[in-house]
Image: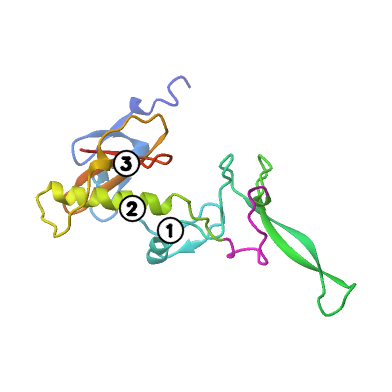
């Protein structure tokens, strides 16, 4: 029992002449050989949500940016939010003095008791599919900064543009605010650019690696 969790005590020889524990080896039924993780290629069979188990095609998952449209995470603790129903009383416009009750749905966290009403998000008339993602107020400013960095990235490799832009804002300036990192990858040049944008004073710094 002392060596129960020590998997390297007993290793097997793979076809690539490397020793691996049995729990990390695969058996190929076609060539009848042992394969280690370095000898196999992993492919995605299907995309699904681990919370609601919704299965979707790869094209639909890419269109949704690999996000589930029915499940949301709590912004306070990260726990999965659950849908709660409540009755809202409305007055009938054609019959004064008469009221009618309608169902309204909101999201609530069962761990920290956070609800969407605390953030001013209005209730929805349907249980699923009606929640819209709130756009960040810094979205346009971040996109404009990233556009300048992409132009500088292309100019760094000597490609000539017929437009001229001012890069004085890209000089390092002393700032005590928090920076948010953005990674940009050029798939053709395999070149990475790290952009650090300050969300308070719009100053950003960049570095290539």
Q: Residue 171 lies in what quarter of the image?
A: top left
Q: Main secondary structure of the magenta part?
A: loop
Q: Residue 91 lies in what quarter of the image?
A: bottom right
Q: In which quarter of the image is the C terminus?
A: top left
Residue shown at 42%/61% (left/top)?
61
Q: Position of residue 170 (x, y in %)?
A: 26, 40
Residue shown at 27%/33% (left/top)?
172
**Residue 47 shows which numbered tag?**
1
What's the CA distance linking mark 3 and mark 1? 24 Å
Near-viewer residue (25 or 131): 131
From the image, tell me which residue sits under label 3. 25
Which comes sooner in the sequence, label 3 or label 2?
3
Dot 2 alpha-carbon crowd within 10 angstroms: few under 14, some 14 to 19, many 20 or more: few
Q: Position of residue 69 (x, y in %)?
A: 52, 60
Relative placement, left or right, of 22 versus 170 is: right
Give, as a single range, the part of the protein colored magenta: 118-131
Near-viewer residue (11 or 60): 60
Secondary structure state at the residue bearing disc 2: helix
What's the CA distance linking mark 1 and mark 2? 33 Å
From the image, tell me which residue sits under label 2. 144
Relative placement, left or right, of 88 versus 98 is: left
């Amino acid at each position: 029992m002392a060596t129960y969790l020590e998997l390297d005590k007993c290793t097997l020889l793979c076809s690539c002449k490397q020793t691996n524990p049995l729990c990390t080896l695969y058996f190929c039924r076609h060539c009848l050989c042992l394969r280690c993780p370095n000898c196999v290629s992993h492919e995605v069979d299907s995309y699904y949500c681990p919370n609601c188990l919704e299965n979707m095609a790869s094209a639909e998952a890419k269109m949704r940016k690999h996000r589930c449209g029915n499940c949301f995470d709590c912004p306070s603790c990260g726990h999965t939010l659950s849908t709660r129903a409540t009755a809202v009383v409305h007055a009938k416009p054609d019959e004064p003095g008469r009221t009618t009750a309608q169902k309204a749905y909101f999201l609530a966290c069962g761990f920290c008791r956070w609800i969407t009403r605390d953030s001013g998000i209005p209730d929805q008339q349907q249980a699923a599919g009606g929640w819209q993602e709130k756009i960040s107020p810094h979205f346009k400013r971040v996109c404009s900064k990233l556009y300048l960095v992409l132009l500088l990235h292309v100019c760094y490799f000597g490609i000539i543009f017929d437009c001229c832009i001012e890069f004085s804002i890209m000089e390092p300036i002393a700032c005590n605010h928090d920076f948010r990192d953005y990674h940009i990858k050029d798939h053709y040049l395999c070149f990475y650019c790290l952009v650090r944008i300050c969300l308070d004073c719009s100053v950003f710094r960049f570095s290539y690696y």
